[in-house]
Image (tube, rainbow, N blue to C red):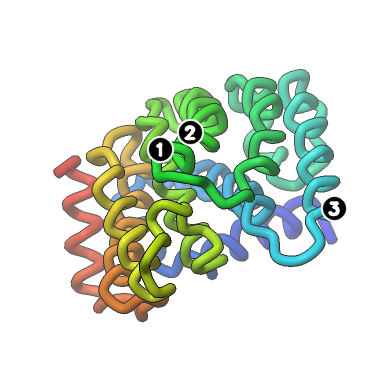
């Protein structure tokens, strides 16, 4: 497979996981679309490592490989297809590499909501710093963490709910309670337009999950368009 085909494969894999983006892209300048999707696809790789099911050793090895890869991007020595698109961007790739090991500790059930956010705070700050280089504007790091925790909730279910939230509740009630807590702890949309769009759609997923206690179908295209329009404006 050529480098171009391999890159397209990774970008398409992310788009399949985020069908909302087919609507969101109308609000993104064509010249920025590929780099935004490449960046979000890279972050999805790390979300997947965080939310691994079963034996974590292969995921941990992959995370160590990514640490070396990101440090190579700082000196323009990429091996991964995503590096073909992201390596030229002047960003603090080494800082992100240094933050990756915290993801392994963040798999453990947190004792509280504060602990859950704290377990990913270092990583969230690194992502925000790099995103300032990739997309031109840094998001609020707590919003990065809230989005990761929301994705983790839908991926691993009750195991993602902090101990103090789960205590005394059924699994279904604890899932809803943690969803509400995450929504309340999610800062208002800031950052680049691409981040605001993705964050708005991620929050929409979380709100639907909170109502049903499980992942819900997407709303209509018209509803997604309205959500994207508001996020693009910065509302």
Q: Secondary structure at mark 1?
A: helix
Front tag of 1 and 3? 1
Q: Which residue is mark 3?
A: 57
Q: Secondary structure at mark 2?
A: helix
The quarter in which the N terminus is drawn is bottom right
Q: Secondary structure at mark 3?
A: helix
Real-space Cα distance between discs 3 and 2?
Answer: 24 Å
Query: Where is residue 13 drawn, in percent x and y?
Result: 62, 65
Are discs 2 and 1 less than 8 Å apart at CB?
Answer: yes
**Is residue 31 visible in this depiction of the protein?**
no
Real-space Cα distance between discs 1 and 3?
Answer: 27 Å
User: Which corner quadrant of the image does residue 94 belong to?
Assistant: top right
Viewed as shown, does residue 221 lie left or right of 142?
left
Viewed as shown, does residue 78 lie left or right of 120?
right
Viewed as shown, does residue 26 lie left or right of 12?
left
Query: At x 56% / y 32%, what residue is drawn?
Result: 123
Viewer-side residue, 141 vs 177: 177
Are discs 1 and 3 less than 8 Å apart at CB?
Answer: no
Q: Earlier in the sequence, mark 1 or mark 3?
A: 3
Viewer-side residue, 50 vs 193: 50
Q: Which residue is mark 2?
A: 118
The answer to whether 166 is drawn above or below residue 74 in the figure is below
What number of labels is visible?
3
Query: Where is residue 36 drawn, in percent x and y?
Result: 49, 44
Front tag of 3 and 2? 2
Q: Which residue is mark 1?
A: 114
Query: Where is residue 95 drawn, in percent x and y?
Result: 64, 21
The quarter in which the C terminus is drawn is top left
């Amino acid at each position: 497979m050529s480098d171009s085909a391999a890159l397209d494969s990774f970008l398409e894999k992310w788009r399949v996981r985020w069908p909302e983006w087919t609507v969101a892209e109308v609000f993104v300048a064509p010249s920025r679309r590929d780099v935004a999707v490449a960046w979000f696809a890279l972050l999805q790789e790390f979300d997947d490592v965080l939310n691994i099911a079963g034996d974590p050793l292969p995921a941990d090895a992959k995370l160590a490989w990514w640490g070396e890869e990101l440090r190579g991007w700082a000196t323009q020595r990429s091996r991964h297809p995503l590096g073909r698109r992201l390596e030229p961007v002047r960003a603090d790739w080494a800082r992100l590499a240094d933050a990756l090991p915290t993801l392994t500790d963040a798999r453990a059930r947190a004792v509280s909501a504060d602990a859950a956010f704290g377990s990913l705070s270092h990583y969230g700050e690194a992502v925000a710093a790099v995103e300032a280089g990739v997309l031109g504007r840094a998001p609020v790091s707590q919003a990065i963490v809230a989005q990761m925790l929301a994705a983790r909730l839908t991926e691993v279910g009750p195991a993602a709910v902090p101990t103090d939230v789960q205590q005394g509740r059924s699994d279904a009630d604890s899932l809803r309670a943690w969803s509400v807590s995450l929504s309340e702890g999610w800062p208002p949309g800031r950052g680049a337009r691409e981040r605001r769009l993705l964050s708005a759609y991620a929050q929409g997923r979380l709100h639907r999950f909170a109502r049903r206690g499980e992942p819900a179908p997407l709303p209509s295209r018209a509803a997604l368009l309205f959500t994207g329009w508001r996020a693009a404006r910065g509302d």
